[in-house]
Amino acid sequence: MPLFSSPEDLTRILRDLPSRAPIYAIRAGHRQRDLVKPPGSLGRLEDIAQFLASWSNDGTPRAHVVRGLIFAGTHGVTAQGISPYPSSVTMQMVETYRRGGAAINVLARLEKIDLDIVPLQLEHPTGDISLGPAMTMDETLDALNAGADAVKVPTDLLILGEMGIGNTTIAAALAARAFDGDGNEWAGAGTGLDTDGIRRKAAVINRALDLHRAAPKTAFAALQRLGGREQAALAGAIVKARLESIPVVLDGFVVGATLATLYSEVPDIITHCLAGHLSDEQAHVKLLRRMRLSPLLDLGMRLGEGSGAALATNVIRAAVHLHMEMATFSEAGVTNRDDA
Amino acid sequence: MPLFSSPEDLTRILRDLPSRAPIYAIRAGHRQRDLVKPPGSLGRLEDIAQFLASWSNDGTPRAHVVRGLIFAGTHGVTAQGISPYPSSVTMQMVETYRRGGAAINVLARLEKIDLDIVPLQLEHPTGDISLGPAMTMDETLDALNAGADAVKVPTDLLILGEMGIGNTTIAAALAARAFDGDGNEWAGAGTGLDTDGIRRKAAVINRALDLHRAAPKTAFAALQRLGGREQAALAGAIVKARLESIPVVLDGFVVGATLATLYSEVPDIITHCLAGHLSDEQAHVKLLRRMRLSPLLDLGMRLGEGSGAALATNVIRAAVHLHMEMATFSEAGVTNRDDA
């Protein structure tokens, strides 16, 4: 039985999301204050330990089994000349992922991430969003289910990434739809457009937004009209991870815009998500701010394919190891400030 | 024969620093543009690969042998009530490092850093800088040499950290001396002072700056008058690493202020240094900006003991692995933008 059998299923699941266990976050906070360091001196690493504890089923933060899902899709909107690379590169890159030669393969080996590449009907590009809907209802449901089905249990931490020539145009359209902006506000350089190219991309996005303005204000409708297969799959994976209490690490602008689409229907969907990094794609900073997500890394990366999220894994692992392995003041025999 | 036999030796070495090999950086940049990704899309990771290549002896960036040096010292200025922790905590923490229970031990294990803890005459605190010089000339030379001698060859990457209750006061004094400010500008919360405490700390720093204002404007004089043993040792290690072409990763405010002391004599000393992270200690951002160093991480950490630099190791290792292991466009059979 697929998780999503009708468009209403997404809305229904979003309105009844499981929440985390605050008691585990509180207990993890107590332990943090006992560890042999000034209180708060590990900054966000302390927050991460509490965050992971709150999504565990026993209060123990874990980042041992880390899986990565990279969804790939092809986009009809590439016909509008909104990328410096031809759409065929999507298929070639999927082949490169399979051979292990891409950035994400290198990072997955380094960070011990179990990587799954999920190509989504690459030989059937979605419809051009500036001329019509990206997908049919069934295609959208299939992609949502493909994303949900790709989430394996047990997983301590799920890295989400994507590949799809043209998909920063898709992402900008989704972000503009979620946060009521336009193409000029949300279009960026993507893989390397110049100023003229960005202007052209913004115009394409504006045509798409106008065309689909009357569609229902649901996440499903946004994904079907303005999205793509990898965006719908990412949405399915984010939702399924939540149902399984698996914390998610978001990669850059495209993954963030997909989350924004869900967020615009139910803001609580961000609660199990960490922003892995701040992309150099210009609108990403605004996108994260709108959802009050603070990125773990800011290294000027803008590659996609899960690379920023994969690199953030080490920060999250460090938070877990520090939480579990540091001595307490009393174990170490160190004078705490209150005893001084 | 020690590296530093007289105060003039430091000045002499600083004025004749070896430089890196620009040809290796250029070649590494060419390879980056061949790798299967949009040019520049790995952001700072590309810069790091070029930086490491330029300090290698064969053009190959390496981060295999990573060593960490944590220097510890005790400070007479703690008598002025400028820390919420008693000076005895320095010795207790050194014991904790030896037993493996501190944050830096956990991070060193995770990041595969070969860690050396170097306590410097902890039973003999330096003089109170608000009442006289911190050290004699010989004590300063001994600490400089202890730092230089702790640098082992071969090392691909050197992590520098410190521990010493009271040493953010020392660091603020050194920063103020290097960049012509005062205590109000450079004093921060350290391990957790409140507003009154910071005001008291700033006043102590101002007394120290006034007292030593007429001293020679050299890095040596600054370290001797306003520094501490771990600051002099850090300076010795930074200089020795440069002589051995070993790139250095700086931890937070205290290490940065030590570098600033050298920088104020010869700015080129920063060329082999990476700023591991931005500390939550408030003046660190200003300190790095003055030296045009951009931190790799910004996670609100303010623990010292090399923790931020240790965590940055993974970013640097990722840069090396990506540079060495990614396929090129032609190897992967992927269409590049110029071929499209």
Image (cartoon, coloured by chain):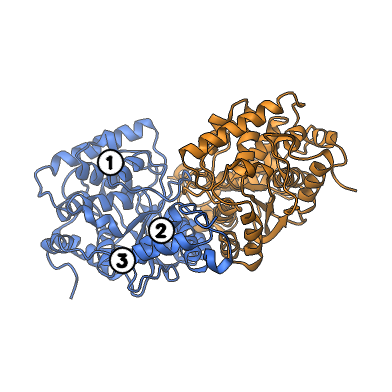
Chain colours: A blue, B orange
Asked if badges 2 and 1 are on one and the same chain, I answer yes
Of the 4 image quadrants, the one containing the C terminus of chain B is top left
Q: Where is residue A27 in the image (x, y as percent from the top left)?
A: 37, 66
Q: Mark 1 lies on which chain?
A: A
Q: Residue at x 31, y 43 (%)?
A: A289
Label 3 secondary element? helix
Tell me, yes or no, if residue A327 can be seen here.
no
- Against B295, residue A91 (above or below) is below
Distance between the alpha carbons at the discs numbered 3 and 2:
15 Å
How many marks the image carries: the answer is 3
Along the horizontal axis of the image, is A112 left or right of B243? left
Question: Is A92 displayed left or right of A14 in the figure?
Answer: right
Residues packed near mark 1 inside 10 Å, few (<14), some (14 to 19) or many (20 plus): few
Q: Which mark is residue A48?
A: 2
- Name the residue tied to disc 1: A80
Q: Position of residue A296 (x, y in %)?
A: 43, 51
Q: Is residue B272 left or right of residue B240?
A: left
Residue B129 in view, yes or no: yes
| C-alpha distance separating marks 2 and 1 | 42 Å
Looking at the rendered image, the disc whose residue lies closer to the viewer, 3 or 2, is 3
Instruction: Give the SS element for disc 2.
Output: helix
Residue type of the residue flagged with mark 1: Gln
Precedes in sequence: disc 3 or disc 2 = 3
Q: Foreground residue, B198 or A287?
A: B198
Distance from label 3 to label 1 (Cα)? 52 Å
Q: What residue type is labelled 2?
A: Ile
